[in-house]
Amino acid sequence: MGRRPVRRPAAVLFDRDDTLVEDVPYNGDPEKVRPMPGAREALRLLRESGIRLAVVSNQSGIGRGLLTDAEVRAVNARVEALLGPFDAWVHCPHVPQDGCGCRKPAPGLVLEAARLLGVRPGECVVIGDIGSDMGAALAAGARGVLVPTARTLPEEVAAAPHVCRDLLSAVRHVLRKDPRRAGGGPAPADGPVAGGPVEGAAGADGPAGSGRRS
């Protein structure tokens, strides 16, 4: 008996920095917000499909005294101005030493976003660029899709449940009723990539794993 097709999610939850917009370390300046390639088209596809959208983001700059909550919200507002509205925004202000339940890879942000959206965590997909995004999805009972960038560690790519080359590919993967090609064989060019090297996983900023991991 064949495997059941994967259902489309009720909601997609995005990491913010290096997933929807370029990562600017501890950014509190809305003018520095730059969308990631394919972000507008990816979000358009999801909105047209009636899927609810949220952002779940670690913002430890608040806990480190480098940002205010108001500055984070101003940057979020700029993201919406450039990419369109989201149904919920949830961020964690804590530093790792706080031991909170919301900082990814803990499940708190995913659980809270699901609650705000009125869906079950198991009906959500989390799209992010590092292992803590995938860990939060797993801990909450959601699905995870990794889109590697220059700061993604090779072991995070290898451990991720699904890996896609870019944001638009990830969304197309999520929207497929059954992301596996009939008859097996390699994934299509815009589809998921199994663990291991991923095209575009290292960029001009240096080898995979470079950069801040808030």
Image (cartoon, grey):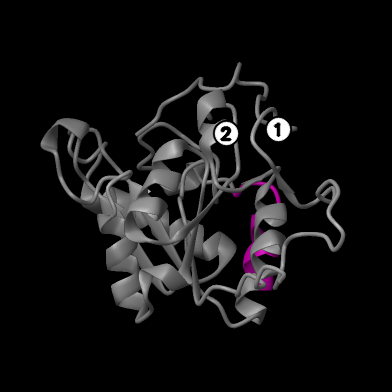
- Give the number of callouts: 2
Residue 163 shows up from this direction: yes
Residue 73 in which image quadrant: bottom left
Which residue is at the front of the view, 208 or 83?
Answer: 208
Q: Residue at x 54, y 41 (%)?
A: 160
Residue 131 in which image quadrant: top left
Q: In the image, 40: left or right of 21?
A: right
Q: Residue at x 26, y 45 (%)?
A: 103
User: Horizontal and vertical percent for residue 184?
Assistant: 83, 54
The residue at which mark 1 appears reads as 198
Q: Is residue 118 magenta?
A: no
| Range of magenta residues | 35-45
**Quick check: marks 2 and 1 in contact, CB under 8 Å?**
yes
User: Horizontal and vertical percent for residue 194?
Assistant: 68, 40
SS of the residue under disc 1: loop
User: Horizontal and vertical percent for residue 169?
Assistant: 72, 54
Q: In the image, 47: left or right of 176?
A: left
Q: Residue at x 46, y 73 (%)?
A: 123
Amino acid type, residue under disc 2 in the picture = Val
Amino acid type, residue under disc 1 in the picture = Val
Check the picture and name the quadrant holding the N terminus.
bottom right
Crowdedness near tag 2: few (<14), some (14–19) or many (≥20) residues, C-alpha within 10 Å:
many
Residue 153 shows up from this direction: no
Q: Distance between the Cα atoms at labels 2 and 1?
A: 8 Å
Residue 123 vertical placement versus 202 (above, below):
below
Q: Is residue 43 magenta?
A: yes
The residue at which mark 2 appears reads as 157
User: Horizontal and vertical percent for residue 14?
Assistant: 48, 56
